[in-house]
Image (spheres, grey):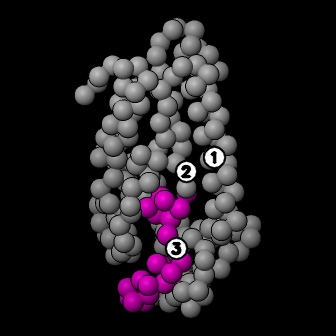
Amino acid sequence: MIVDSVKSTGAPAVLVGLPDNAANFPSVRRAREFFNEWPYLLTLGISVSINCYYSSNYIFIPGYILTLLSKTPVTATCADVPGAVDYIITSSDLNAINARMAQINSHIASKATENGYAFFKLAALYDLPKGSLDLYNVLFSGNPFGSNFSLDGVHPSARGQDILANAAVQAINARYRLGIQ
């Protein structure tokens, strides 16, 4: 185990937990947000079903948009197809993902405490407010999900990495009292 290997050296360490809520990823959006983009989608040959307006589902935007574009003309629906790769995330899907991340975070935090290591969560970045959805930007911008995230809206950009590095410094300073600036 990596923690045991680091512990055997006597070196200090910082452990990092996952975000708390997968719905906070900038590329994961509510179906209604997607529906509100219907005028632009129509210019691409994609009509949007009214079920998106009423749906409580979430959508992983990059995957869904690319799939839709490969099938134009097409009508986008926000209904989940169980077992299919449809990029639709139901409330129960989201609850399962978040529950699993909570289990993982609990395990990582307990290992940090057990070994006297610093700990912080990626929530330092992923809990920041996300901008409004603009599908034109998703397709044609160099930073479609804001300057803190890469093109997929999941992984941090260089600026996002800076935010996480600052969170790591705060955790290290709090645990080891190093005064890193």
Q: Residue at x 60, y 33 (%)?
A: 108
Q: Give the residue at mark 3.
A: 30
- At label 1, the amino acid type is Ala
Q: Is residue 85 above or below residue 38?
A: above
Q: Earlier in the sequence, mark 3 or mark 1?
A: 3
Residue 59 drawn at (x, y percent) = 55, 70
| Mark 2 burial class by Cα count in 10 Å: few <14, some 14-19, many 20+ | some
Kindly indicate whether the residue at mark 1 contacts the one at mark 2 (C-beta within 8 angstroms): yes
Q: Secondary structure at mark 2?
A: loop
- At label 3, the amino acid type is Arg
Q: Earlier in the sequence, mark 2 or mark 1?
A: 2
> Secondary structure of the magenta portion, mostly?
helix
| Mark 3 burial class by Cα count in 10 Å: few <14, some 14-19, many 20+ | many
Give the residues in magenta.
22-44
Q: Is residue 47 above or below residue 94?
A: below
Q: Secondary structure at mark 3?
A: strand
Q: Secondary structure at mark 1?
A: helix
The residue positioned farthest toward the right in the image shown: 83
**CA–CA distance in space, label 2 to label 3:** 17 Å
Q: Nearer the viewer, residue 136 or 33?
A: 33
Q: Residue at x 32, y 71 (%)?
A: 137
Q: Give the residue at mark 1.
A: 102
